[in-house]
Amino acid sequence: MEEKKKLTERQQKVLAFITEHQNSVGFPPTNSEIADAMAFHSPNASTFHLKALQRKGYITIIPGKARGIKITGTQSPVAQRDEALVVLRELLACSVGSAERAAELLSRYPHPGAQA
């Protein structure tokens, strides 16, 4: 897998907001919503950060759509939940390889108390 370019602190915050918004509401935020959440003076500032995130490979921007932001390399929240439910069912049924599959799934998500 290609290593993505490092983000600035502000870009990390913008990406975190986009991800959180997507996970909680079910769709990505608009430029205006990003600008409001990040206390930017205009939506142009969010556009600047979105273009940097796209250049660095973290998102894809679909032109002409108000909510045309797609986080790359991640599944939708619904797909993540569905995958987790399959793994839980496999574990409960003591299916062969279920422990390894669960460990691989958990490795994608940092432990809340772990240092990055």
Image (cartoon, rainbow, N blue to C red):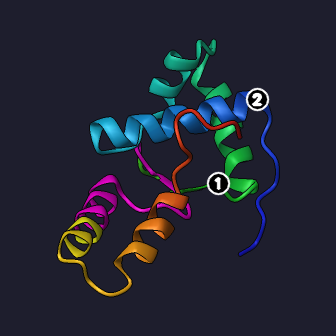
Does 52 appear in magenta? no
Q: Earlier in the sequence, mark 1 or mark 2?
A: 2
In the figure, residue 88 lies in which quadrant? Answer: bottom left
| Picture quarter with the N terminus | bottom right
Q: Which residue does the numbered mark 2 point to in the structure image?
A: 9
Judged from the image, the secondary structure of the residue bearing numbered disc 1 is loop
User: What x and y, as percent, mark residue 58?
Assistant: 64, 54
Rounded to the nearest whole Å, what is the CA distance between mark 1 and mark 2? 14 Å
**Vertical relation: 25 (above or below) 51:** above
Residue displayed at 61% across by 32% down: 14
What is the three-letter code of the residue carrying label 1?
Tyr
Judged from the image, the secondary structure of the residue bearing numbered disc 2 is helix
Q: Residue 63: tell me if it is visible.
A: no
Of residues 2 and 46, the one nearer the viewer is 2
Residue displayed at 69% across by 47% down: 53
**Vertical relation: 38 (above or below) 11:** above
Of residues 31 and 90, the one nearer the viewer is 90
Residue displayed at 47% across by 66% down: 103
Q: Residue furthest front?
A: 94
Q: Which residue does the numbered mark 1 point to in the structure image?
A: 58
